[in-house]
Amino acid sequence: MSVRSSVVRLIVRAGMVVGAILAVTILLAAMPGHNTPKIQMTGQMISSGLQQQRSSSQQMAQVAKQTSQEMPGMDHSQMGADAIAEKANEKAAVSDMSHMGGGAHMHMTEMRQQTPQDVQRANQIAAQLRGSIEKYRDYHVALNEGYRIFLPDFPQPEYHFTNYKNGFMAAMRFDPTQPTSLLYRRTADGYELVGAMYTMPKRATEEQLNERVPLSVAMWHLHTNLCMPAKDQRATADWTKFGLEGSISTQEACDAARGNFRPSIFGWMVHVYPYEESLNKIFAMHHHD
């Protein structure tokens, strides 16, 4: 191999490294509450190209993993007892969604004083969403375009057809026309579209939630206070105490039971039913006839 070819390959590789670093930087900068580190361009970037490229790939993978853990059904890496426990909690979350009110395992934002600006923005969101999901009245179109049914075999008042690409992007920006999930009711011959769900990372503040969907017209909700038994005890654990339907809901009680406590799981969620006629029904927690 000639010296010239080696130099060209080295320059191309360095360019790829810089591009990868800039891409990761842009993604991280867009995330709520993230302080983007400054990047200094030095000659050492060429000599350490391979190492930085690996580091960038690891950062991107970490972003994807964190997002996947904040959306129901996205992290399927666990097997055995862990997978069973995860499914149990997913089903409990679905059951939790079907009931109004908070409780120890669900936290909801408080309603704020409504303003004309909030009403205008909420109506705009509903109109944009309604226009963008009209084609998904045929649920086959949703499936063909990448939406996947969350827990299709588990009876639910509403079935979440989730687009994981939209969910990943929702961690970085808000587009009313690209909801994380579509909401369907089961019918005799398929599914009927009734609404959609937006998501945001669980680290988001109420101010950041309000910037997306006004808290004076909608309540975002977050699943909270999860106590899981130790991994080697999950197969024989007392699930009346553990999990999202369990009686344990504090760090102290979880520690006493030798469990692992998580203050919150998944991410923030808000439902929108754009085919309803009034804002209080459009942004209700659940769909009503």
Image: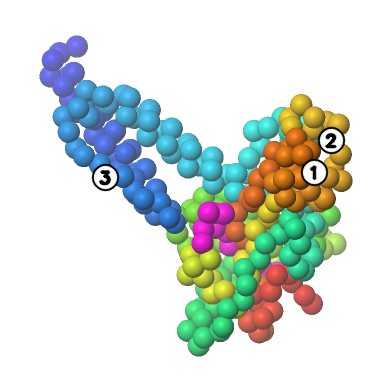
Please state which of residues 35 and 17 is positioned toward the viewer in this rendering: 35
> SS class of the residue under badge 2?
loop
- State the image coordinates of residue 236 (x, y, percent, origin top left): 86, 31
Q: Is residue 52 magenta?
A: no
Q: Is residue 119 left or right of residue 238?
A: left
Question: Which residue is at 72% across, 39% downward?
Answer: 255
- Mark yes or no: residue 111 visible: yes
Question: Which residue is at 69% across, 79% downward?
Answer: 281
Magenta region: which residues? Answer: 194-205
- Mark yes or no: residue 182 visible: no
> SS class of the residue under badge 3?
loop
Q: CA distance from mark 2 to mark 1?
A: 8 Å
- State the image coordinates of residue 84 (x, y, percent, origin top left): 78, 36
Q: Which picture quadrant has residue 18?
A: top left
- State the image coordinates of residue 218 (x, y, percent, origin top left): 61, 74
Quadrant where the C terminus is found in the figure: bottom right
Q: Tag on residue 38?
A: 3
In this figure, which residue is indicated by the disc labeled 2? 237
Which of the marked residues, 2 or 1, is nearer the chain's N terminus? 2
Q: Which picture quadrant has residue 276?
A: bottom right
In this figure, which residue is indicated by the disc labeled 1? 242
Q: CA distance from mark 1 to mark 3?
A: 43 Å
Please state which of residues 286 and 225 is positioned toward the viewer in this rendering: 225
